[in-house]
Amino acid sequence: MIENKAPGKDISDEDLASKFPLAARRGDEPRRQFEIAGVPFGGDLIPVMAGPNTVENREMILRTAEAVKKAGGHFLRGGAFKPLSFPYRSDKYFELREEGLRYLQDARDATGLPIITEVMDQNYVGAVAEVADILQIGTRNMQNYALLIDCARSGKPCMLKRHYGASLRDWLGAAEYMLLEGCTKLILCERGMAVPHTHRASSRFLLDLQVVPAAQEFCSYPVGTDPSHATFWAPWVKPMTLASIGAGADFIMLEVHPDPRNAAVDPLQPISFDAYDQLMLSMEAVARAVGRTVGRSL
Ligand code: PEP
Ligand code: MN
């Protein structure tokens, strides 16, 4: 028995020793700490990654980057390549792809905020890695092992989202693929599970808060949450963000939009700049209660 691991759970000593030895945390081994673009992960600071679902145009991503920075956010998020659920594209439902990457670069040049953005396809790892400080691997690609390997080989820090149907064991298996290929700065993001009673307007996904301490028990890499994708509903983002911090999340990803109701993709989930600014204050208060900080003065 490895000390301090929940006995009788689905992750065995044998898994830790031979299936994901690189991802595994043994006994009291300290959790990993490292910097990405000068921002410390895995310590007292809870970095915040905020921005729109989709990079819609240059002006909106620049405005959002300013707002993210002003409120104390650490990374700008925003998809240039999007895993859109339906194949048709229109003026209202689109992805800017390479053009979006250029706007993200402009936003970083203007604000100094580092960028996290999704890569969906092996063919674009190089292009996304040129702009991104963190490569985001989305829920749908968690077990796209060829993509994981290429992302790891790019040498960039990576964020691996949990598939909405994956066990912790499978998630750590996917992480192991990346660690084995030399990814040294890996962070794990819970973004909500599909369970039988979800996939309805009232609860599209279920944010699995318990997986935060569970993943931290079995794995030494930072574990955070994305309450926006989990709740799919702006009014619930604040409570689930604060709950995530209470549960020990090592970072938070949030959707913030200059005009939430008119967001091109997933308009129900982004919060406004004002709501985000207020949320940062509440996050700081809760973080302090658990001995951490989001770096925002109260
Ligand atoms: C996103 O963060 O833009 C996204 C598509 O998330 P997920 O992969 O969790 O659906
Ligand atoms: Mn989405």
Image (cartoon, rainbow, N blue to C red):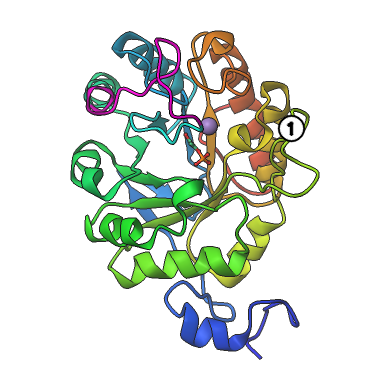
> 210 and 149: which one is in front?
149
The outermost residue toward the right is 197
Can you tell which quarter of the image residue 287 is in? Answer: top right
Q: Position of residue 67 (x, y in %)?
A: 44, 16
Residue 38 at least partly seen: no
> 125 and 224: which one is in front?
125
Q: Quadrant of the N terminus?
A: bottom right
Region rendered in magenta = 86-101
Residue in the image at 49% along x and 29% along y: 86
Q: Position of residue 109 (x, y in %)?
A: 22, 23
Q: Which residue is mark 1?
A: 239
Q: Position of residue 12 (x, y in %)?
A: 63, 83
Relative vertical location of residue 26 with respect to residue 151 in this rendering, above or below: below
Circle 1: element type = helix
> How many marks are shown on the rendered structure?
1
Residue in the image at 32% along x and 55% along y: 147
Q: Quadrant of the C terminus?
A: top right
Residue 100 inside the magenta-drawn segment = yes
Q: Is mark 1 within 8 Å of ligand 1?
A: no
Residue in the image at 32% along x and 9% along y: 59
108 lies left or right of 273: left
**Mark 1 surroundings: few (<14), some (14-19) or many (≥20) residues within 10 A:** few
Residue 134 inside the magenta-drawn segment = no
Can you tell which quarter of the image residue 227 is in? Answer: top right
Q: Position of residue 153 (x, y in %)?
A: 23, 61
Relative vertical location of residue 23 with respect to residue 215 in this rendering, above or below: below
Q: Amino acid at mark 1?
A: Pro
The outermost residue toward the bottom is 1
39 lies left or right of 133: right
